[in-house]
Amino acid sequence: MFNWRQRTWSPLQSMPKKCKGATSFVYCSGYFDGMIRMNINRNPDLSMHWSECPVKLPAKLAYHSSVLYNDHLIVTGGYNGNAVSDCIHEVQLVPPYTVKTLSRMPEPRQYHSTQLFDDNLLIVGGKTTARYQDTLSSVVLYDIKKNECKQMTPLPYEVSEMATVRWGDNIVVIGGADKRGNILNSVVMYNVKTEQSHLLPPMRCKRLACTAVVIGNNIVVLGGWGKKSVEAFNFESYSWQELPEMSQERWFSTAVVV
């Protein structure tokens, strides 16, 4: 856990099982169909342990994306061990924990990202296979209430294995890899209403499979392939700054703000 005000890291209990290509939310899923949970607060307590959660994913998934919508988890795409999924699933987080298929995306996706905008889910980038040459620039808007998918203006470049955050009416796409497998330090802001993109200043480091969160006026980006460094973009100074690094390298990790 990173304390933003004190700029310090504190350890928490390790998870009881390894999770690859996981997602997380505040209310962990990885390459298995279950979830685990921990009750945490701003003062880390090493006596707190992870516990099993009765909620199950629709399948054993990795490299999927998920968002919290009311008392449901909306899960898109991912790799189930045999194929890349094109499904949009709804997982109920309260009894009876129902799982159902809502819709299907225009193409299967893994290593993509999603952000929630009111009753709309924006789905960006990713790959249709494990090959970088099958990386996507496409953007899909899924209307949860109407249960409809709509193709939007694409991103300015193909990208997968990136991080994203929501900033107002924008999704910010951070790092990742292009269709040639080049690792990127580029950052693009995509406006959901106008479908226009513009570039933000690039990160100090090229980052593949990093994660990011918003804290105040800052986008904090953590890790990436072979990296334990952390940096933050401040919208007031319009620049990046280094933050204290993590204790170990992390990629395909997940982060939440509490």
Image (tube, rainbow, N blue to C red):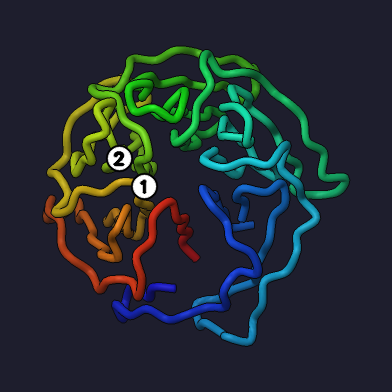
Relative vertical location of residue 249 with respect to residue 10 in this rendering, above or below:
above
Which residue sits at x=34%, y=65%?
249
Relative vertical location of residue 194 with respect to residue 69 in this rendering, above or below:
above
Q: For mark 1, give the secondary structure.
A: loop
Residue 101 marker: none
Q: Do the residues labelled 1 and 2 touch (CB within 8 Å)?
A: yes
Which residue sits at x=40%, y=21%?
139
The residue lying furthest to the right in this view is 96
Question: Residue 118's spot in the image, x, y percent?
Answer: 52, 34
* Amino acid type indicated by mark 1: Ala
The quadrant of the picture occupied by the N terminus is bottom left
Q: For mark 2, give the secondary structure.
A: loop
* Amino acid type indicated by mark 2: Gly
Which residue sits at x=62%, y=41%?
61
Q: Image check: 86 left or right of 3?
A: right
Residue 52 appearing in the image:
yes
Quadrant of the image occupied by residue 8: bottom left
Crowd tier of the residue under label 1, counting other residues whose Cα lies within 10 Å: few below 14, some 14–19, many 20 or above: many
In this rendered view, identify the residue nearer to me: 213 or 248: 248
Task: Residue under label 2, please give it.
Answer: 176
Relative vertical location of residue 162 with respect to residue 40 in this rendering, above or below:
above
Q: Image check: 57 left or right of 186?
A: right
Question: Residue 33's spot in the image, x, y percent?
Answer: 71, 46
How far apart are the alpha carbons under marks 1 and 2?
A: 6 Å
Relative vertical location of residue 45 with respect to residue 186 in this rendering, above or below:
below
N-terminal label among 1 and 2: 2
Task: Residue under label 1, please give it.
Answer: 209
